[in-house]
């Protein structure tokens, strides 16, 4: 059996507890619980930016460079998400890009939606994926002292940023009870953040269109872009992985792009990389000629 039985049971129990959290919010919507829910949504925003702007665009793809204060802030935000250390997150994601939708891909969509979304966590890794993962050069991540510190102290970073602080704030500042604070500010946030991130691996590889490279599986999906603040234009991203905008000229719902550009204006981000519009237009033209599509930028609606 290639299923992680204990982990699968743990995931099932956690999802049941999150359902209990929603039940409490519906049946007992006290002001205290509503404050905790709003705080949880704020933490989800922080963790999503930690993954999208930090682990993904900054460290994994080197789409831009950032000064130390921004890197520290993004490292802490990524620790809130709790999705491995930056080093390990980048190692899996670089493997995904290099061997996308093959057995070397950790979340190969050729094995179905459920596997690409969450099943890859609950099952033993494919031998080819293990081999390909360790072939990826990830040494540049540890060359950054901020990312290296987090990797070497990830348990502490996770415990403080993803559990202690999120659970303590509602209790200390507006009198939330310990049980609901764990359910909402920790468990529900973790589950929602994981599913939001994993929809990029699953839905954005299975649903949408491919205006930039029709030969690959990743697709543009605005429905994925909205909860991920700009990560859903996946056909564009796989065609031009080092573009900090993640969509053509930053089009569509793309809060991440605007935040990076604001950091650049105040001198905290620099060397922003973007694909040449001439190259992009050429790719779109070739795709239209191949599929006889109309001349329009499609974002997956």
Image (cartoon, rainbow, N blue to C red):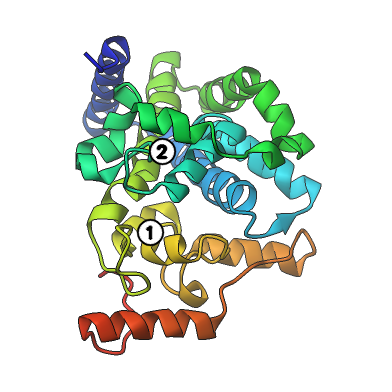
Tell me the residue that label 2 is attached to: 193
Q: Nearer the viewer, mark 2 or mark 1?
A: 1
Label 2: which secondary element? helix
Confirm whether residue 188 shows in the render.
no
Q: Kindly check if marks 2 and 1 are in contact, taking CB atoms under 8 A apart as contact.
A: no
Q: Quadrant of residue 214?
A: bottom left
Position of residue 206 measured from the top left corner of the image (x, y, whole percent): 23, 54
Position of residue 270 measured from the top left corner of the image (x, y, whole percent): 75, 64
Q: Residues within 10 Å of mark 1 (few under 14, many from 20)?
A: many
Position of residue 203 measured from the top left corner of the image (x, y, whole percent): 27, 51
Tell me the residue that label 1 is attached to: 232
* 29 is higher (above) or lower (below) than 246: above
Q: Residues within 10 Å of mark 2 (few under 14, many from 20)?
A: many
Q: Residue at x 30, y 23 (%)?
A: 122
Which one is nearer the viewer's eye here, 153 or 99? 99
Measured Cα–Cα span from mark 2 to mark 1:
15 Å
Confirm whether residue 77 shows in the render.
yes
Q: Is residue 112 left or right of residue 285?
A: left
Q: Is residue 272 left or right of residue 180?
A: right
């Amino acid at each position: 059996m290639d299923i992680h039985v204990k982990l699968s049971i743990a995931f099932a129990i956690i999802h049941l507890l999150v359902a209990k959290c929603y039940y409490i919010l519906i049946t007992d919507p006290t002001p205290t619980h509503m404050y905790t829910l709003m705080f949880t949504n704020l933490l989800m925003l922080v963790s999503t930016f930690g993954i999208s702007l930090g682990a993904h665009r900054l460290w994994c793809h080197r789409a831009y460079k950032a000064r130390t204060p921004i890197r520290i802030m993004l490292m802490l935000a990524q620790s809130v998400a709790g999705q491995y250390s930056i080093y390990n997150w980048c190692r899996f994601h670089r493997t995904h890009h290099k061997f996308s939708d093959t057995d070397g891909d950790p979340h190969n969509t050729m094995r179905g939606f459920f596997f690409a979304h969450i099943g890859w966590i609950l099952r033993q890794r494919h031998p080819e994926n293990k081999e390909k993962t360790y072939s990826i050069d990830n040494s540049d991540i540890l060359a950054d002292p901020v990312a290296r510190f987090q990797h070497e102290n990830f348990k502490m970073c996770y415990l403080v940023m993803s559990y202690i602080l999120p659970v303590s704030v509602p209790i200390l500042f507006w009198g939330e009870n310990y049980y609901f604070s764990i359910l909402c500010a920790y468990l529900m946030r973790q589950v929602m953040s994981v599913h939001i991130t994993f929809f990029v691996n699953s839905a954005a590889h299975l649903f949408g269109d491919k205006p930039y490279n029709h030969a690959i599986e990743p697709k543009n999906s605005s429905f994925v872009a909205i909860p991920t603040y700009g990560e859903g234009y996946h056909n564009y991203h796989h065609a031009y992985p080092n573009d900090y905008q993640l969509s053509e000229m930053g089009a569509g719902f793309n809060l991440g792009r605007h935040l990076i550009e604001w950091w650049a204006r105040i001198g905290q981000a620099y060397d922003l990389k973007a694909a040449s519009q001439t190259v992009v237009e050429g790719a779109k033209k070739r795709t239209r000629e191949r599929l006889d599509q109309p001349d329009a930028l499609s974002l997956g609606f």
